[in-house]
Image (spheres, grey):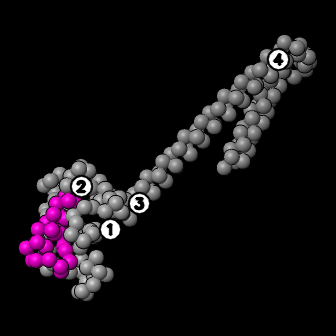
């Protein structure tokens, strides 16, 4: 990229010098003798050509910089959109046993969801709270509710309107896995984001 810029700059400089040389020769009529330039005139001519070249170079470099910034800005925007879309693919958030605290590894995805919801006020979500099978039915319904509310508060703290969110607890009624071990239980302790409208 820098080599192309240097070649363009040198080409423009050489072209400007040629144009300056051609322009000064075209002022001489046929049969007129060329008079040698004195030192002051030569210095002035060189200074003028140098100033013109610097002006052309500065404009060229400036326009290339503006183009490069525009391209870089578009690439950054595209990358940011892709990153947000990837984060929004995560719609299930897991919790520790008997806990409704959002895990650190869930926060980036939840922030992406909150940014989308905040930017799209007509979008609506249902937060479904779930638990594993351990505990009473009543306790698990309450724990599922606390987990859903924890995610709801997080989304609202990041700009989502309360009327865009509905929270439902299913407790242990809808397990993701049917096993009776920690591997299954860890997948059942969750909140799922379900979009009702986008």
Marks 4 and 3 close (CB-CB < 8 Å): no
Instruction: Name the mark on residue 90.
Output: 1
Of the two numbered discs 4 and 3 on the same chain, state the one appearing first in sequence: 4
Instruction: Name the mark on residue 106.
Output: none
Front residue of this view, candidates 155 and 13:
155
- In this picture, is 1 found above or below 107? above
Image quadrant holding the C terminus, namely: bottom left
Q: Which residues are magenta?
A: 127-152
- In this picture, is 153 found above or below 26? below
Of the two numbered discs 4 and 2 on the same chain, state the one appearing first in sequence: 4
Q: Which residue is mark 3?
A: 83
- Residue at 78 percent across and 31 percent down: it is 17
Judge whether residue 152 can be spotted in this image: yes
Marks 3 and 1 close (CB-CB < 8 Å): no
- In this picture, is 66 found above or below 106? above
Marks 1 and 4, Cα distance to the nearest angstrom? Answer: 70 Å
Of the two numbered discs 1 and 4 on the same chain, state the one appearing first in sequence: 4
On the image, the x and y values in percent for residue 77 come to 43, 52
Of the two numbered discs 3 and 1 on the same chain, state the one appearing first in sequence: 3
Q: Find numbered disc 3 in the image and state the secondary structure of the residue it sits on.
A: helix
Residue 150, quarter of picture: bottom left
Q: Which residue is mark 4?
A: 43
Between marks 2 and 1 in the image, the one whose residue lies nearer the viewer: 2
- Residue at 85 percent across and 18 percent down: it is 42
């Amino acid at each position: 990229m820098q080599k192309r810029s240097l070649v363009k700059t040198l080409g423009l400089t050489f072209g400007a010098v040629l144009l300056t040389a051609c322009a000064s020769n075209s002022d001489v009529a046929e049969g007129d003798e060329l008079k040698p330039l004195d030192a002051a005139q030569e210095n002035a001519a060189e200074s003028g050509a140098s100033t013109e070249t610097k002006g052309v170079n500065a404009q060229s470099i400036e326009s290339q910089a503006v183009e490069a910034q525009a391209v870089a800005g578009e690439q950054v925007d595209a990358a940011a959109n892709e990153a947000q879309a990837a984060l929004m693919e995560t719609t299930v958030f897991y919790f520790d046993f008997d806990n409704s605290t959002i895990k650190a590894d869930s926060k980036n995805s939840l922030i992406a969801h909150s940014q989308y919801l905040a930017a799209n006020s007509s979008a609506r979500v249902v937060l479904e709270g779930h638990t594993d099978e351990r505990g009473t039915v009543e306790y698990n319904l309450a724990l599922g509710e606390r987990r859903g509310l924890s995610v709801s508060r997080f989304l609202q703290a990041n700009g989502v309107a309360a009327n865009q969110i509905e929270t439902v607890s299913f407790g242990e009624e809808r397990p993701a896995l049917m096993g009776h071990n920690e591997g299954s239980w860890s997948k059942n302790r969750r909140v799922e984001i379900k979009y009702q409208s986008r």
